[in-house]
Image (cartoon, helix red, strand yellow):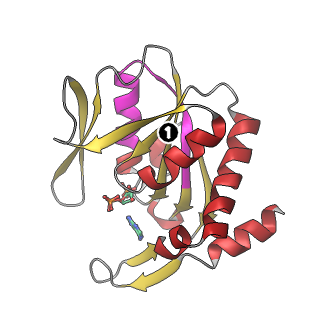
Amino acid sequence: SREEKLNYIMGKIRPFNDFPSKGVLFRDICPLMKDHKALCATIDLFEEYVKQTYPMVDFIVGLDARGFLFGPLLAQRLGVGFVLVRKKGKLPGPTESVSYTLEYGQAEVEVQADAVEKGQRVLLIDDLIATGGSLHAACELMKKCGAEVLGCLVLIELKGLKGVERQGSTPVFSLFQY
Ligand code: PRP
Ligand code: ADE
């Protein structure tokens, strides 16, 4: 059942205090990735949600790097392709990019200019939403390319950081909220 799957997956998310810096409670998904049953259950739950909510989706768009762990598995289940949003400087050929502000300094996300066609409907996926800066920039990037952003999928939402609010009217679906 859905509840059993959620409980099983939750047991495979390992908290680490003070990583990568003091005061951060890091949610480590490596045990989940390592466990066949947990990884299958995770994709099952995303698949069920997308098939019910967004049967019209054209592409799954994954965020560098941990969105690449779940995105292609989900895309295969749905019978659609996978698009990579990368950190700046990793993609060849013409690209579009969006820069955004981090706690300290700037970051930039990039996609190939021909990754999507105008009006194509996309869902973004990442492992976790914290401040929401990464997902917001990736959504802006997809809109810049002419895509219609249906919503975002994440395994984990860190509620205290208000990252979902930062997405405005774009819906964010999460399996776990901490
Ligand atoms: C982490 C995480 C999300 C992002 C969330 O990635 O995987 O992509 O941070 O934070 P935000 O909501 O505040 O933007 P990170 O930048 O550590 O890169 P990685 O995936 O390459 O490890
Ligand atoms: N990315 C941003 N914040 C994180 C956290 N607390 N755990 C894992 N990944 C993160």
Write the residue at 49% across / 66% down. 160
112 displayed left or right of 143 = left
Quadrant occupied by the N terminus: bottom right
Write the residue at 79% across / 61% down. 2
| Quadrant of res 42 | bottom right
Q: Residues within 10 Å of mark 1 (few under 14, many from 20)?
A: few
Does any portion of residue 171 appear in the rendered image?
A: no
Give 147 or 42, whichever is nearer the viewer.
42
Write the residue at 51% across / 76% down. 31
Give 117 or 97, whichever is nearer the viewer.
117
Q: Secondary structure at mark 1?
A: loop
| Quadrant of res 90 | top left
Quadrant occupied by the C terminus: bottom right
Q: Amino acid at mark 1?
A: Gly
Task: Tell how many labels.
Answer: 1
* Outermost residue toward the right in this view: 1
Q: Which residues are magenta?
A: 136-154
Q: Position of residue 11 (x, y in %)?
A: 63, 79
Q: Is residue 50 magenta?
A: no
Q: Position of residue 162 (x, y in %)?
A: 47, 57
Q: Is residue 148 magenta?
A: yes
Q: Which residue is mark 1?
A: 168
* Outermost residue toward the top in this view: 118
- Residue 25 drawn above or below residue 147: below
117 displayed left or right of 97 = right
| Quadrant of res 155 | bottom right
Give 144 or 161, whichever is nearer the viewer.
144
Does any portion of residue 132 appear in the rendered image?
A: yes
Q: Position of residue 39 (x, y in %)?
A: 60, 63
Q: Position of residue 151 (x, y in %)?
A: 56, 37
